Image: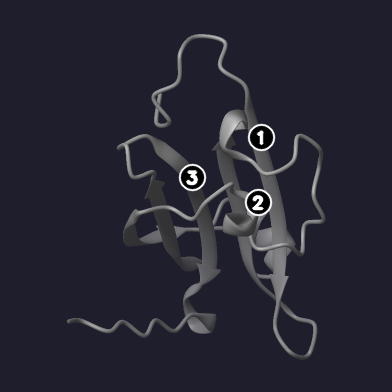
Amino acid sequence: MALALLLGGAVRRLSRLVYDEVDRPIAVEQATFPDDVLVARRAQPVATPATALLTEPPARVLQRLRAVALSDSHAALLSVPPASPAIGVEPRGFHRDGRTVTLSRSRHPGDKYADVTEVA
């Protein structure tokens, strides 16, 4: 429903674990795309940034940041205790015609996240 696709519309899902410069896991990312906006109709390497897979970049992105508790599975991947505090980052990218073309969710342990925002 979040991508507003017709019933049966094909999507691609990508998941990746992000590491810092000393190979410690610092984020779990999951992204979903409508199949018709991807450059290639095959699996891409998980190291490829998600928006690089699109035929064109989103014209607009809304991003929500919120405090969350890590699920058992995310905590295990990030080597922290279950229910540890984390930052949930949820950007949603829109095509110039208004369609949602990316929906991502990432979880960052609260002690490993920094955000820098430029406000114009």
Per the rendering, the mark at residue 102 is 3
Helix, strand or loop at label 2? It is helix
Residue type marked 1 = Arg
- Distance from Cα at disc 1 to Cα at disc 3: 10 Å
Q: Is residue 36 above or below residue 38?
A: above
Helix, strand or loop at label 3? It is strand
Left/right of residue 8 with respect to residue 86 in the rendered view: right
- The residue beneath circle 2 is 53
Badge 3 or badge 2: first in the primary sequence: 2
Residue type marked 3 = Thr
Helix, strand or loop at label 1? It is strand
Label 2: how many Cα within 10 Å (few below 14, some 14–19, many 20+): some
Residue farthest toward the top in the current orientation of the protein: 7
Residue type marked 2 = Leu
Please name whichever residue, 70 or 119, is drawn nearer the observer in this view of the structure.
119
| Residue 79 visible in this rendered orientation of the protein | no
- Of the 4 image quadrants, the one containing the C terminus is bottom left
